[in-house]
Amino acid sequence: MINTADILETINMIRQENLDIRTITMGISLFDCVSDDPKRLCANIYDKITKKAEHLVKTGEEIEKQYGIPIVNKRISVTPVSLIGGAHKEETYIEIAKTLDNAAHALGVNFIGGYSALVEKGFTEGAKRMIHTIPEALACTERVCSSVNVASTKAGTNMDAVNMMGRIIKETALRTKNADSIGCAKLVVFANVPMDNPFMAGAFHGVGENECAINVGVSGPGVVASAIRRAGDCDLSSLADIIKKTAFKITRVGQLVATEASNRLGVPFGIVDLSLAPTPAIGDSVARILEEMGLECCGCFGTTAALAMLNDAVKKGGVMASSHVGGLSGAFIPVSEDEGMIHALEAGCLKMEKLEAMTAVCSVGLDMIAIPGDTEEAVISGIIADETAIGVANTKTTAVRVIPVYGKGPGENVRFGGLLGYAPIMDISTVSPLKFISRGGRIPAPIHSLKN
């Protein structure tokens, strides 16, 4: 039975606490687009995407109007491009990137993900060529997002790929320097990448997915923070229970939207990602949740423990609300997209080392962090290596999305606008791990990978 109090509570969440559906993402398989002819390949890709997602934006807008639930983004993810490029030359990969961008513009979606490669154990020649094109692809497109998986608990860490990605990130920053190196905001390096992630920049359509699928990402940091504030001075067990109940309610909204979109588009429902994805808006911050839990400022001692509790409670509440929870699901800590994180960084309370510790218990990793533009490639590779080690050792997803802002250093800031927000340039250690990174090869998988 529909409860009036529940309806009013949901309305309040939307109007006053920034509850929204962060994204409806349609995943589309491109395996049947493969062709030896570059022009035919690109034509097949464009035709399939624009046909399958023809009504995606319109359907999202209709659901928004009917239920009064904001749906911030409508997006598309496709099969990792490295898997369909085959023996094509680098020039063809660039044309594929442009084709994806053209399709995104034609459909009115804000991002399209899948300019991606899976190289955790080694490189195919096609994957290597595709990775080399990432800087140019992100510089010549507006809405294309890219990701590379360089490690997994089963395979270990491909340190040759880690080394390569340090250079790729630097080159991407240089090629997009006139826009504050924004190309790096559309590039993420993963360990244990999820195959059904609806959130950019890491979204792609996994190889074991349906021909087409609808995945929804929900967001509600403001709702959780308000619930904690109303709870007052309760103990931590009670607080965890409040977070679980709130996550349940948030996820039910996502389940409703996902089911509606799936039915109207005639596309199978994939997953609901119940992540607390913040925005630069006041009151929509994961950092502020942690402070409502009792921290003076995000980044102080106790932050990792509070974040671990939050992440666990969110997952427990969400899995009771939907039978198909996936993606990343938990708490995101992207610095430039979270006004509380920005405040903590500016106050000197939040450092790179603390952020790294927090990634051991959150849902993603070092995300949307602006660093000095003159940071050496080896240092960036070292950041990636450390973060993938956390993911591999803990059998969890971790990621790195750092932005070496060309021409800027500590004390300056960068403003990307929209959901990407703005960030102070973080001062980081410049002591070089070059000799270690340059050894190459593969860091073996941990002993607990031997499970079957």
Image (spheres, rainbow, N blue to C red):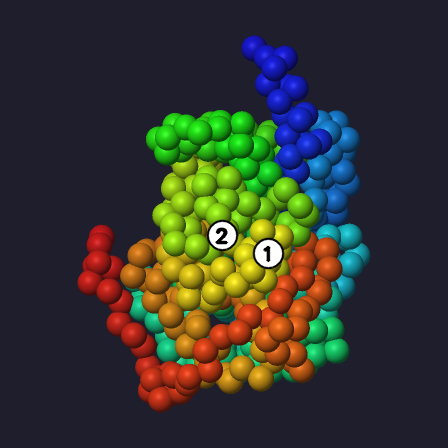
Q: Amino acid at mark 2?
A: Cys
- Image location of residue 257, percent across then percent down: 63, 33
- Disc on res. 73: none
Q: How many marks?
A: 2
In the picture, which quadrant includes the N terminus? top right
Q: Is residue 310 left or right of residue 392?
A: right
Taking the spot 40% from the left edge, 33% from the top edge, the residue there is 240
Q: Is residue 270 left or right of residue 96?
A: left
Q: Is residue 394 visible?
A: yes
Taking the spot 67% from the left edge, 45% from the top edge, the residue there is 282
- Image location of residue 332, percent across then percent down: 51, 51
Taking the spot 52% from the left edge, 54% from the top edge, the residue there is 333
Q: CA distance from mark 1 to mark 2?
A: 9 Å
Judge the density around disc 2: few (<14), some (14-19), many (≥20) Cα neighbours within 10 Å.
Answer: many
* In the image, residue 288 above or below residue 352: above
> Closer to the N terminus: mark 1 or mark 2?
2
Q: Nearer the viewer, residue 181 or 118?
A: 181
Disc 1 on helix, strand or loop? helix
Answer yes or no: do the residues labelled 1 and 2 have beta carbons within 8 Å? yes
- Image location of residue 266, percent across then percent down: 64, 37
The quadrant in which residue 62 appears is: top right
- Disc on res. 343: 1
In the rendered image, which residue does mark 2 sit on? 298
Disc 2 on helix, strand or loop? loop
Q: Is residue 311 visible?
A: no
Taking the spot 47% from the left edge, 67% from the top edge, the residue there is 352
